[in-house]
Image (spheres, rainbow, N blue to C red):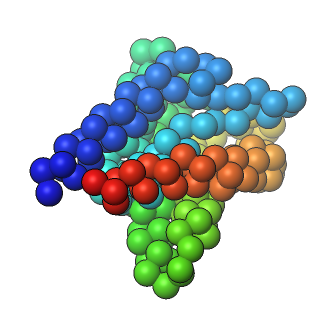
Amino acid sequence: MRQRSTYRLSILGILTAIIVLQDFIPMLGNIPIGPLSLTTLHITVIVAAIVLGPVDGAIVGGVWGVLTWVRAFTFPSSPLAPLVFVNPLVSVVPRIFIGLFAGWTFMLLAKWMHSKAAPMVIASIIGALTNTVLVLGFIYLFYHTPAVAKAYGVNVDNLFKALSAIFVTNGIAEIILAAIIAPLIALPLRKLNHGK
């Protein structure tokens, strides 16, 4: 029992440290691919949720969210950040829910499916989808303003279209990225954990 608790705290500490590094090192947290800029931070949150459970996934997601929130005031990652990420409902809450939804999805499906790979893939998709839908949804809900629309290069009447385009391009690419990478990392970590 003590070994498992030590393992959990070690993995939680490592994944939290990785989130901090990803947030502050551009090429580690955001990968530019052609016109897209794909975030990889949600993958770390999903891995935490699958390996350690929804609560620890929420903790790692919360760390990412708080970093996003603080940076919006101090060292914005983009011109949009000081406009929308100063609101914790946009910067923190979606990241916490990544961990919760991905963890719950995995726990539920793992009870029904013999293979652990399929539940991991589905949980990764749900986690990535949670981040994209909640962040873009909250931006539209709370910041349907000319200033935010201008940051996206559109007028306020076209903000929904601009956010929808981001979902179709970045959002879907990030879902695919998570569905491939998160299970590849989580599967051996879970085996190691259950071997303890």
Answer left or right for 70 relative to 168: left
Q: Is residue 134 visible?
A: no
Residues 28 and 143: in front is 28
- Residue that protrudes farthest toward the front in the picture: 195
Indicate whether 129 appears above or below 3. Answer: below
Indicate whether 5 appears above or below 152. Answer: below
Indicate whether 152 appears above or below 59. Answer: above
At 20% from the left edge and 43% from the top edge, which residue is drawn? 6
Residues 26 and 115: in front is 115
At 80% from the left edge and 53% from the top edge, which residue is drawn? 168
Q: Is residue 70 visible?
A: yes
Answer left or right for 160 relative to 118: right
- Residue that protrudes farthest toward the left in the picture: 2
In the picture, residue 152 is in which quadrant? top right
At 54% from the left edge and 46% from the top edge, which residue is drawn? 185
Q: Position of residue 178 (x, y in %)?
A: 63, 50
Indicate whether 27 appears above or below 145. Answer: above
Q: Position of residue 179 (x, y in %)?
A: 66, 55
- Residue that protrudes farthest toward the bottom in the picture: 112
- Residue that protrudes farthest toward the top in the picture: 75
Residues 11 and 59: in front is 11
Answer left or right for 155 relative to 113: right
Q: Position of residue 92 (x, y in %)?
A: 41, 43
Q: Position of residue 1 (x, y in %)?
A: 14, 57
Answer left or right for 194 relative to 134: left
Quarter holding the C terminus is: bottom left
Residues 81 and 10: in front is 10
